Image (cartoon, rainbow, N blue to C red):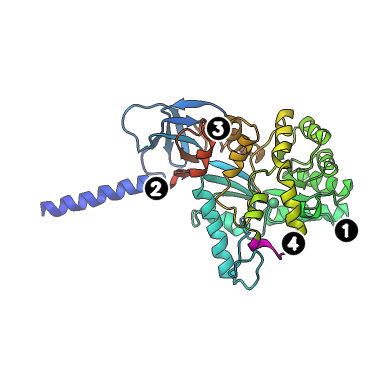
């Protein structure tokens, strides 16, 4: 009898530990996490740092003697990373091709769920998808803890100028808002595979970005050439994506207007080239398109460095598409290779990225009151940035997903 009670107690205790390990649901005690160093997201580093979590929030950051819930040893504890430009709905079809056709709705759902899971497991606890209709249910299912994935912000749709009048474009913005968009995505230039030239009028950009502002939404604009960047800045848009052909004047324009700039230098074009067999044959993924991307590669770090030297605020985004989900940290490494300090690159993927999303007071920083989005990478990420590609601990909203 005694043995039985003992066994039951043991099972109960193990069960209790397991609940705490999952982050509790409000009922458990605090969780403490320690590592040899803690990067706070703003630039500060605490040796032997400890984060204390209660429920879904951080309650303390500092040092603490004695036992902790998770002692991660020689690792760097930091805020969950943030990618401000992904496409979680891009996947390879069952025949191996991008846009290969013939996929069932169930197949597509599975592929998207896997993209979300991979992204979170890589240490990215928040992403902005720019964006697709399928993001909406995904965002809600993740928020309800039904699906494993990062916090998701989405544009739900992508707005192209085409032959639309300014008033029609304003309608599109209002529609997106009604559909539940967190942000507006607009194209002011072609893709790199089409030459990247401005393909809208100033009046069209003005309409989209001013209507977004009127609706209380941020506006993120795909713009490669100087004309499309200048037009977007003039229109009061919130953020420029890509900007591969940005010149000194358009970089200065972004700086003067304090607009966010997200040049995607470390993953998206490289991923297309790595996965050429999968992409070739779909739309503008033809021989000319691949030649244009290959030609653009050397320019990526140069544009980034120019904007960095000019003091432009650059939150970290990858434009992650099929094949690239979970590889997001490569962008951070590419920024350091291009000349940014490791601290600067980490700030770009944490507190600065959060600020660009309008979430600077809730995520991206390890401080009391912030969401408990916490990751750990092996070794010293400040000394060797390549460690960010090997995330070994992931907590989001107080729940542990990887350890
Ligand atoms: Zn994109």
Q: CA distance from mark 2 to mark 1?
A: 52 Å
Name the residue at 21% across, 49% down: 9
SS of the residue at dot 2? loop
Q: Quadrant of the N terminus?
A: bottom left
Q: Quadrant of the C terminus?
A: top left
| Dot placed on the residue nearer the N-terminal end, 3 or 1 | 3
Q: Position of residue 209 (x, y in %)?
A: 79, 45
Residue at mark 4: C-beta within 8 A of ligand 1: no
Mark 2 or 1, closer to the camera: 1
SS of the residue at dot 4? loop
> Looking at the rendering, which quadrant does residue 227 occupy?
top right
- Give the answer, above or below, for where 309 lies relative to 286: above
| Mark number, residue 286 | 4
Q: Position of residue 250 (x, y in %)?
A: 82, 36
Give the residue at mark 3: 41
- Mark 3 crowdedness (10 Å alpha carbons): few <14, some 14-19, many ≥20: many
Give the residue at mark 1: 163
| Dot placed on the residue nearer the N-terminal end, 4 or 3 | 3
Image-based side of 268 in relation to 389, left or right: right
Mark 4 or 3, closer to the camera: 4
In the image, which residues are magenta?
Answer: 277-282
Image-based side of 335 in relation to 235, left or right: left
The answer, for residue 78, to whether it is visible in the render is yes
> Looking at the rendering, which quadrant does residue 285 occupy?
bottom right
């Amino acid at each position: 009898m005694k043995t039985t009670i003992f066994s039951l107690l043991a099972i109960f205790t193990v069960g209790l530990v397991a609940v705490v390990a999952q982050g509790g649901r409000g009922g458990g005690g605090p969780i403490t996490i320690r590592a040899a160093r803690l990067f706070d997201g703003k630039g500060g580093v605490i040796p032997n740092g400890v984060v204390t979590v209660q429920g879904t929030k951080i309650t303390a950051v500092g040092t603490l003697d004695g036992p902790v819930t998770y002692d991660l040893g020689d690792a760097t504890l930091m805020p969950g990373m943030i990618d401000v430009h992904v496409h979680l709905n891009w996947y390879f079809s069952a025949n191996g091709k991008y846009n290969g056709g013939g996929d069932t709705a169930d197949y597509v759902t599975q592929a998207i769920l896997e993209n979300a899971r991979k992204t979170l497991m890589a240490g990215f606890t928040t992403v902005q998808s720019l964006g697709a209709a399928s993001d909406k249910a995904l965002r809600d299912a993740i928020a309800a803890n039904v699906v494993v994935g990062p916090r998701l912000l989405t544009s739900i749709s992508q707005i192209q100028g085409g032959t639309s009048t300014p008033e029609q474009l304003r309608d599109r913005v209002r529609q997106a808002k009604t559909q539940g968009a967190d942000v507006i995505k607009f194209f002011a230039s072609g893709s790199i595979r089409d030459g990247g030239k401005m393909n809208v009028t100033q009046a069209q950009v003005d309409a989209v970005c001013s209507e977004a502002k009127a609706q209380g939404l941020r506006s993120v604009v795909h713009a490669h050439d100087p004309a499309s960047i200048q037009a977007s800045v003039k229109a009061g848009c919130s953020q420029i994506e890509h900007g591969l052909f940005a010149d000194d004047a358009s970089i200065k324009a972004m700086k003067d207007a304090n607009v966010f700039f997200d040049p995607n230098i470390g993953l998206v074009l490289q991923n297309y080239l790595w996965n050429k067999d999968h992409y070739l044959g779909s739309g503008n993924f033809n021989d000319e398109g691949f030649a244009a991307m290959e030609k653009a590669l050397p320019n990526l770090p140069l544009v980034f460095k120019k904007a960095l030297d000019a003091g432009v605020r650059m939150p970290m985004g990858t434009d992650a598409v099929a094949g690239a989900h979970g590889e997001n940290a490569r962008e951070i490494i590419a920024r350091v290779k291009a000349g940014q300090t490791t601290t600067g690159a980490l700030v770009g993927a944490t507190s600065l990225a959060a600020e660009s999303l309008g979430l600077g007071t809730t995520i991206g920083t390890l401080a009391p009151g912030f969401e408990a989005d916490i990751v750990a990478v092996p070794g010293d990420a400040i000394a060797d940035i390549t460690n960010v590609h090997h995330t070994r601990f992931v907590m989001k909203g107080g729940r542990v997903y990887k350890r």
